[in-house]
Image: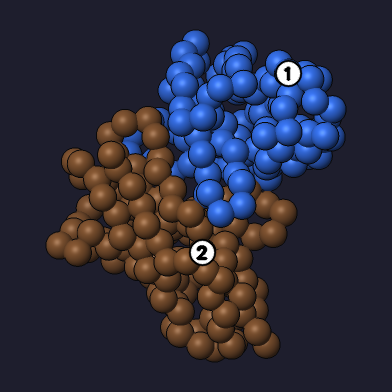
């Protein structure tokens, strides 16, 4: 029962390198999300996908792009990594985007930009 | 806009002590309220939820009651264990696509 799977778990990049973070869910959920978590700042929404074929910006989209590849997969791309993007990235999914549905999270990708 | 405010941590308790983590919210409409828990090295997990006023969510000995009159959703547990050491997030979700999270409260429980 995998739930939400994120790869890789850890990554170190140099400034200016590009990187794609992968996320897949096996719960047949409609909606998927990317967050970043920084000390003392809680979770901030980067992008979300309400359903297959749609994506929208969240609170902090600058420097990122996303692709909803199919219903299961939602990837996050850093085109030119910057030290300010050092963070822990979480992918999440929910059954439908109604307010009673909780989100299910992956275990995160710990990304360091040097 | 919608927001969630929870007490700053860290909170340090001895085993078997009573726990309260305060959470208040501001929201338009009728939000659902959630508590999530994050153990070291892991993602957030749903701990409990309440979807309307006066609902009580409960799980693993934790409880929280949706208080519309005070716009609060405080987390309580009667007797904490070392294994409860984690970061706790209060969150709300309205009819839109976004969940609003509080900043998190770190709990340390000493044996």
* Residue depicted at x 50% and y 58%: B104
Name the front one of labels 1 and 2: 1
Residue B43 lies, in percent from the top left, at 63, 48
Using residue A46 as the reference point, say whether residue B57 is left or right of it. Answer: left
Q: Secondary structure at mark 2?
A: strand
Circle 1 SS class: loop
Q: Is residue B34 left or right of residue A85?
A: left
Label 1: how many residues lie within 10 Å, few (<14), some (14-19) or many (20+)? some
Bin the neighbour count of mark 2 within 10 Å (Cα to Cα): few under 14, some 14-19, many 20 and up. many
Residue A42 appears left or right of B3: right
Q: Which mark is residue A91?
A: none
| Chain B drawn colour | brown
Q: Nearer the viewer, residue B68 or B46?
A: B68
Tell me the quadrant of the picture where the C terminus of chain B can be found.
bottom right
Instruction: Depth check: give the residue in front, B83 or B110.
Output: B110
A73 sits left or right of A94 in the view: right
Residue at mark 1: chain: A
Residue sitting at x 67%, y 34%: A84
Any part of residue A20 in sight:
no
Q: Which label belongs to residue A80?
A: 1
Using the rendered image of the protein, determine whether residue B52 is visible from the camera's viewpoint. yes
Q: What is the display colour for chain A? A: blue
Mark 2 lies on residue: B105
Q: Is residue B31 above or below residue B11?
A: above
């Amino acid at each position: 029962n995998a739930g939400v799977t994120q790869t890789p778990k850890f990554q170190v990049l140099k400034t200016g390198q590009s990187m794609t973070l992968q996320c897949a869910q096996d719960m047949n959920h409609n909606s998927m999300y990317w967050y970043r978590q920084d000390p003392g700042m809680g979770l901030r929404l980067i992008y979300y996908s309400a359903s297959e074929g749609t994506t929208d910006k969240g609170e902090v989209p600058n420097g990122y792009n996303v692709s909803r590849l199919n219903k299961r997969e939602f990837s996050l791309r850093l085109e030119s990594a910057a030290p300010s993007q050092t963070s822990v990235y979480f992918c999440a999914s929910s059954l439908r985007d109604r307010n009673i549905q909780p989100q299910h999270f992956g275990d995160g990708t710990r990304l360091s930009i040097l | 806009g919608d927001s969630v405010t929870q007490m700053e941590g860290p909170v340090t308790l001895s085993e078997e002590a009573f726990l309260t983590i305060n959470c208040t919210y501001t929201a338009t409409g009728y939000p659902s309220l959630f508590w999530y828990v994050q153990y070291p090295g892991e993602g957030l997990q749903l701990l409990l939820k309440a979807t309307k006023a006066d609902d009580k969510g409960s799980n693993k000995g934790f409880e929280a009651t949706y208080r519309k009159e005070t716009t609060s959703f405080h987390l309580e547990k009667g007797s904490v264990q070392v294994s409860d050491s984690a970061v706790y997030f209060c969150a709300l979700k309205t009819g839109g696509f976004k969940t609003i999270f509080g900043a998190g409260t770190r709990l340390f429980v000493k044996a």
